[in-house]
Amino acid sequence: MEERGLKIFAPEGEPTKSDEVFYNPKMTENRDISVIAAKTFFAKADIEKPNIADPLSGTGIRGLRYSQLGELYLNDANPNAVESIEKGLETNNTEAEVSNDDANVFLSRMPNFFHFIDIDPYGPFTEFLDSTARAANYQSFVGLTATDNSAPTGSYPTVCRRRYGSRPLKNGFMHETSLRIYIKEVFRNFARYDKCFEPKICFQYKHYTRVMGRVTESKRRTNRNLGNIGYLSYCNECGWRKLERVEKCEHCDSEVQIAGPLWTGKISDSRFTEKMLEHFPEKWETSREIVELIDSEAEILTPFYDLHELCSRHGLQVPKRDKVIQTLERKGYPVSRTHFGPRGLRTDAPLEDILRIID
Ligand SMILES: [Zn+2]
């Protein structure tokens, strides 16, 4: 197998046995965006030789893709994985420290040591949060993938409350609610160690969610960001939503549903995503397009609207999305498309104005 010019020694597809190592091509965009994000972070950070950890390395492809950025530490609990990693390193002429430990043991051995940690598990990342927060340097970057989206998108609310301590909401923008629950959980875990996690680029794509951000040692910054932990109110009668806990819908006065606690701040930093776009190779088109969408919506806070859902709820014909965007823009509202989906629209305009424009 090959990805972006690197050779990998594993079959493609889904694993059939628990100890099988496999290569998942569906994660190529995740790895592309992660490489560019790390590169963007290190371009500005003053770190001579960054220590980079891939604690759940699998085939080793993720770590291999970071080889230009610093000193690699690849780890996997599965001896078969370690074999593929070593083969991959040799064939691609790359050096790394390789270990065969449980990921939490691996990370716990090196407190404050890593300048970039990439957690890429099957399922939730929650069981690795504690050791990741400890192993992250005071000036570092962290990326985490979650593939347990059904719980925080509201299909299994009890699992979500157990795993993330938050109440989810199953509706048209459930993937944004779940992303905000993930960010909240990462922020809280780092805050326990007086480390501040700030989201730089966070997104949902295909079957997974990705949270990436900067870690600093700043009690003051952590305290300030505590203000970004809160609740979301949603009216199931008219589709109104707000990143705040309120009693009644401000559009139709009905009772609202509440989700949270979750992250109510920005889910990406447009200064960072703008810089990322400068680093993208031309050939990585799909990944670049995802980041362009994330960049365009980064400054708008209100959870996105699914135009089809909004129209069917209000008995309206679905208009062309670009037309709605143009009209809202002309009226001076912040508005954009969204990476969450082709029917999505993100704007801070009041619901009555959006509905008036569609009608
Ligand atoms: Zn309402």
Image (cartoon, helix red, strand yellow):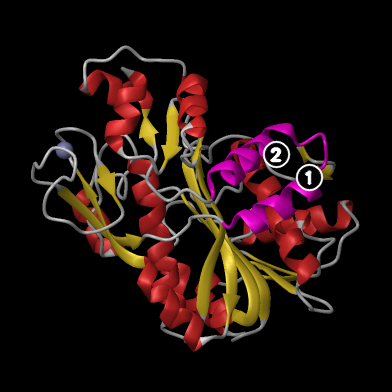
Label 2 within 8 A of ligand 1 by Cβ: no
Task: Let me know if residue 210 is in the magenta part.
Answer: no
In the displayed structure, does residue 189 sit left or right of residue 95?
Answer: left
Amino acid type shown at disc 2:
Arg
Q: Is mark 1 on a helix, strand or loop?
A: loop
**Quarter residue 260 falls in:** bottom left
Percent x, y for residue 195?
A: 51, 82
Residues in magenta?
Answer: 269-298
Give x and y (percent) for residue 128: 47, 69
At horizontal 41% and vertical 83% (from top left) the residue drawn is: 192
Residue position for label 2: 288
Q: Position of residue 300 (x, y in %)?
A: 47, 48
Mark 2 or mark 1, earlier in chain: 1
Crowd rating for badge 2 (residues with CA inside 10 Å; few <14, some 14–19, many 20+): many
Residue 88, image x, y percentages = 80, 53
The mark found on residue 327 in the picture is none
Q: Which of 335 and 135 is in front in this view?
A: 335
Q: Which quarter shows the C terminus?
A: top left
**Label 1 environment density (alpha carbons within 10 Å; few <14, some 14–19, many ≥20):** some
